[in-house]
Amino acid sequence: MKIVVTVKLVPDPNAEKRIDAATKRLVRTGAETVLNPYDEYALEAGLQLKERAGGDSRVTVFSMAPEPLRETLRKALAMGADDAVVLSDPGLQGSDVWATAYAVAAALRKLDFDLLIVGGLTDDSSTGAVPGALAEHLGLPCVTNARKVTIADGRLEIERETDVGYQTVRSPLPALLTTALTFGEPRYASLKGIMGAKKKTIATTSLAELSLDLGVGESGSKTELRSFAPPAPRGKGRIVEAGDGPAGAAAIFEFLQEKKLI
Ligand SMILES: Cc1cc2nc3c(=O)[nH]c(=O)nc-3n(C[C@H](O)[C@H](O)[C@H](O)COP(=O)(O)OP(=O)(O)OC[C@H]3O[C@@H](n4cnc5c(N)ncnc54)[C@H](O)[C@@H]3O)c2cc1C
């Protein structure tokens, strides 16, 4: 069973985000770069499937990221992935979602896999558009938001989280799968894993190896960020004072009614 997990490298979610006014791009320096938290769930799914399948099953992590950030993927290798591939090229700078998905799909086409697991959402740009675009480019069935995954008789079966419960969805392989945050906590890297990761391969590929028909980067991007603004500051809260018991309950009821919440 060959599994590829896509991992975006993002600024630490706890760091304050800043957009460069001139380029209108997220400032990625000054904050530690980490694995996109959603992708750690995707990796956990991949590692569990590999363990269950046994034999010569492998998990490869893939990222499109600037070359200096590639060592961040060592954490995914320490968690248990077998190797990593990074698509890095200055020509990718300024790629919007379309250009990103186009380039990533071209790089993934060079990898041999039965299952592609994608995180579903990123912590920085958060469009959630990449998985569907990858499935379209690669001609794969796209099963999303899995909280439970099994593979039997060469078919993928998932429990798919929805607002009102879950659906059971089946698909042939190869397929693209995204994981829900209810999948289960990603594992911590063990000391043995951390030591072993030092010897694992992080291969780099570039645009020259992909022979793309269409442009990527700034010139190949079809969308333009017109403007950006921070969220409006929150208004001052109102403190409703009331005693315990019926008076307090009535005050809370009145407040919720006023806000049309009940
Ligand atoms: C005009 C414009 C210019 C931009 N320029 C830049 C730029 O110069 N540099 C920059 O970093 N961003 C840039 N962006 C943002 C960039 O397009 C998005 O970060 C990228 O398309 C992924 O979108 P997302 O983060 O919303 O992914 P989502 O769709 O939310 O991600 C879902 C899943 O897709 C996978 N995924 C997404 N991105 C990657 C990746 N790079 N590698 C591996 N897996 C991935 C992950 O598994 C992730 O969980 C630009 C956007 C626009 C509109």
Image: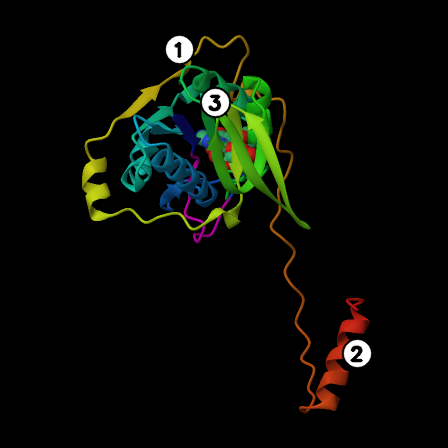
Residue 65 rendering spot, x and y as whole percentages: 40, 29
The answer to which of marks 1 and 2 sits earlier in the sequence is 1
Report the front residue among 61 and 141. Answer: 141
Report the front residue among 262 and 208. Answer: 262
Residue 259 left/right relative to 12? right
Residue 17 rendering spot, x and y as whole percentages: 49, 48
Rounded to the nearest angstrom, the CA distance separating label 1 from label 2 is 65 Å
Residue at screen point 55% across, 11% down = 214
Residue 245 rendering spot, x and y as whole percentages: 70, 90
Verify CB contact (< 8 Å) between mark 1 and mark 2. Answer: no
Q: Which circle, 1 or 2, is nearer the viewer?
A: 2
Q: How many marks?
A: 3
Residue at screen point 25% across, 48% down = 190
Rounded to the nearest angstrom, the CA distance separating label 2 from label 3 is 53 Å
- In the image, residue 103 above or below residue 211: below
Establish whether ligand 1 lies closer than 8 Å to the Cβ of label 3. yes
**Badge 3 element:** helix
- Highlighted range, magenta: 7-18
Judge whether residue 247 can be spotted in this image: yes
Judge whether residue 64 can be spotted in this image: no
The dot on residue 208 is 1
Rounded to the nearest angstrom, the CA distance separating label 1 from label 3 is 13 Å
Verify CB contact (< 8 Å) between mark 1 and mark 3. Answer: no
**Residue type, label 2:** Glu
Residue 211 rendering spot, x and y as whole percentages: 45, 8
Q: Residues within 10 Å of mark 1 (few under 14, many from 20)?
A: few
The dot on residue 27 is none
Residue at screen point 44% across, 35% down = 8
**Residue type, label 3:** Val
The dot on residue 254 is 2
Q: Residues within 10 Å of mark 3 (few under 14, many from 20)?
A: many
